[in-house]
Amino acid sequence: MTFRAPTYVVLGMLRLGVKSGYAIKKVADASTQFILPTSLAQVYPELARLEREGLVTRREDPNGSRKRSAYQLTDEGRAALLRWLRSTRVPPFQFRDEGMLRLYFADSLPREDQIALIRRLRERARDAKTHLRRDILPSAESQSPAEVRFPVIAGRMGADTYAYWERWLARLEAEMGKEAASGHNPPGSGA
Amino acid sequence: MTFRAPTYVVLGMLRLGVKSGYAIKKVADASTQFILPTSLAQVYPELARLEREGLVTRREDPNGSRKRSAYQLTDEGRAALLRWLRSTRVPPFQFRDEGMLRLYFADSLPREDQIALIRRLRERARDAKTHLRRDILPSAESQSPAEVRFPVIAGRMGADTYAYWERWLARLEAEMGKEAASGHNPPGSGA
DNA sequence: TATAGCATGTAATTAGTTACATGATTAA
DNA sequence: TTAATCATGTAACTAATTACATGCTATA
């Protein structure tokens, strides 16, 4: 049995008291989404597999006459989550971001379009920051009990990172604009 | 014909004057790797496909008696790269990072292990920063001609982001350590 | 009464990685 | 002479997304 990150999204959500597959997807969309997107076609097979392997148990939990399954961690499931959290093997960072890849190859563009690209990246960082601070963090702060602090900490790390990128790209944009205004145009630039 | 990010790694590398599939992989490993990892099993079929669709042309380019293919962009290939760079549709940021996911679920850990997790994440950020600044950026600065600046800019953005995370996590680590030392232990914390 | 949301799943497709296979050349 | 690097590809597998399919319930 091998586990990947989506496995631990499911185990972690169950640990936080989320019970059904549908609810895991909903809560993930309003929280871990910004770290790792999760789809229902991952969640349901993963729950079935975790049950087969004894990390979770399932019971019927109908909502009125609408049927529903409630899952909870077994001791083994809790242990697996802890082992993962404690594991010293942390995979390397990688941005996997198409926007940053565009920045890498931006030399092919004329100066004007380079600046436009940087502006778009900055605006995206600003929007992501605003989204996290306005839509994600408040609900995480209010909905989770006092002893649950790390969802908010992780959300702040994300929001602060976007804010950092916004500043970083604003500075780059300003520098590029100044160069363009002063007529400084390095040879070979442009399409 | 649909294109994804790996397609543009290939087109972008060809635009920068890299010629063979093997060389694309090598250069990517020393540059775009930190944004988007690239494997040979992606590069070769992608080159074949781009040739079929007329975005690149291939010619024999033997190295001594060892055979080799040299690819270069067609006008259509250059246009496709420019269209992508100019496209206003920028996919949303997402971290896709297992380390940050661990942070999100760290409430299950006892205080001591929470601090250890944060320390590991900080050390990983420090190592990634050092790697970029020491191994990646110098070669990008020396190897690329003067009119090619964006590989270095993207590399700096990456390195500065890691440096930011290092500071951010150091601050969090210090705060957690202080709380632990002062005996402040919120109810419900721990495994 | 019809739309949105709750709830659970499978099928098909697309994407990506790892392993396999081959062979030449160069440097230790 | 042997290990590393150059060079090109395919096969097999693993992972992830999108689309499909179904049916109930609450609300506008």
Image (tube, coloured by chain):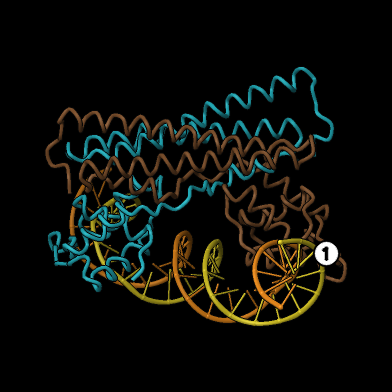
Chain colours: A brown, B cyan, C orange, D yellow
Residue A44, percent across and down?
Answer: 69, 66
Q: Residue at x 63, y 53 (%)?
A: A29
Front residue of D11 and A166: A166
Q: Residue at x 73, y 45 (%)?
A: A82
Residue with the mark numbered 1? A58
Q: Is residue A90 left or right of residue B6?
A: right
Residue A25, percent across and down?
Answer: 67, 58
Please report, as a chain letter, where disc 1 is located: A
Check disc 1 and report its element: helix, strand or loop.
strand
In this rendering, the answer to whether A113 lies above or below B22 is above
Q: Is residue B126 left or right of residue A15?
A: left
Q: Quadrant of the N terminus of chain A?
A: bottom right
Q: Residue at x 38, y 55 (%)?
A: B38
Answer few, some or many: residues within 10 Å of disc 1's Cα (few below 14, many 20 plus, some between 14 and 19): some
For badge 1, the amino acid type reads Arg
Q: Is residue B72 left or right of residue B104?
A: left
Q: Quadrant of residue A146?
A: top right
Q: Quadrant of residue B153?
A: top left
Q: Is residue B6 left or right of residue B187?
A: left
Residue A175, percent across and down?
Answer: 28, 29
In this rendering, the answer to whether B116 lies above or below D9 is above
Front residue of A25 and B150: A25
